[in-house]
Image (tube, rainbow, N blue to C red):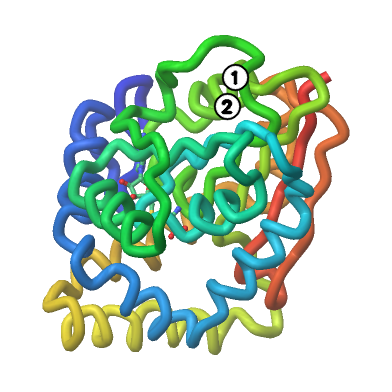
Amino acid sequence: MNDKSTHFGFETVAEADKARRVAGVFSSVAESYDVMNDLMSMGLHRLWKHFTIQVAGVRTGDRVLDVAGGTGDLSLAFAKKVGPKGAVWLTDINQAMLSRGRDRLVDHGYTLPVARCDAEKLPFPDGYFDCVTVAFGLRNMTHKDAALKEMARVLKPGGRLLVLEFSRVWAPLAPAYDFYSFKILPWLGDKVAKDADSYRYLAESIRMHPAQPELKTMMEEAGLARVDYFNLTGGVVALHRGYRI
Ligand code: SAM
């Protein structure tokens, strides 16, 4: 892979093509995204997100940024925590995902600020947020290092970044997990979302994403301190946490 190429699942593609292909995936799945999330994780994504919210320790009056927030699960939960004196920004690069997120928030009685933006170039000043989260988004970004630096930049000193992402599963679970990911997931994607390819990309992109210790190092290199992580469901998912000091 040369300087200008990157991964899109197991494929090597030009950097300029990755964002376009990722946009294609999320524009295609936006409508069935929430149903598919429940189905393919058997509801577990709700527990993983609940744990993230507990670890975030967000308080009344805090400013929170939900990067790659999609249909807004975390934004909604944080909005309930920060109250009217705080602020939660829902952001995503994809208009279809963002529109669904905004509509869902409104359905729940929240009109939060929403911004379409690339995590690699966040339109916020330095030191603005108490907490930044990115759930199942980092894996899709072309320059993960640049995105992590941006997320660190917009944190106040003492603020924390939480990265919830698929990760490296505990070895004894790997054969069953591989079977599920490469056989059942694309089949489910085909039947429910009429899109097997996007769910094949999901399985492949998980395998290409840095494992727990590598992501910890990347967060440290982005300027975050006291980085630690929690393995959830045998490492199917990991929650990384780091602080700006
Ligand atoms: N955070 C939500 C959740 O946990 O349900 C949505 C996660 S969804 C799997 C991944 C999201 O990342 C998509 O909405 C996609 O548009 C977004 N995304 C991908 N690349 C991005 C980037 N460079 N900047 C911001 N968002 C991005």
Image x and y of residue 94, in percent: 24, 42
Farthest top residue in view:
126
Please state which of residues 224 and 213 is positioned toward the viewer in this rendering: 224
For numbered disc 2, what is the local secondary structure? helix
Image x and y of residue 50, in percent: 65, 67
Label 1 vs label 2: CA separation? 6 Å
What's the mark number on residue 154?
Answer: 1
Quadrant containing the N terminus is top left
Give me the residue at 18% from left, 77% from top: 193
The kind of residue on which mark 1 rests is: Val
Image x and y of residue 173, in percent: 65, 83
Quadrant containing the C terminus is top right
Left or right, 86 with reference to 39: right
For numbered disc 1, what is the local secondary structure? loop
Give me the residue at 40% from left, 58% from top: 109
What's the mark number on residue 60?
Answer: none
Please state which of residues 44 and 98 is positioned toward the viewer in this rendering: 98
The kind of residue on which mark 2 rests is: Met
Please identify, in this view, whether the residue under mark 1 or under mark 2 is nearer the observer. 1
Q: Is residue 230 above or below residue 149?
A: below
Give me the residue at 83% from left, 27% from top: 225
Left or right, 16 with reference to 120: left
Farthest right residue in view:
226
Badge 2: few (under 14), some or many (20 or more) residues near its Cα, within 10 Å? Answer: many
Q: Please give the residue where the numbered disc 2 appears in the rendered image.
A: 151
Give me the residue at 53% from left, 11% from top: 125
Image x and y of residue 45, in percent: 54, 72
Instruction: Check if mark 1's residue and mark 2's residue have beta carbons within 8 Å.
Output: yes
Residue 239 placement: quadrant: bottom right
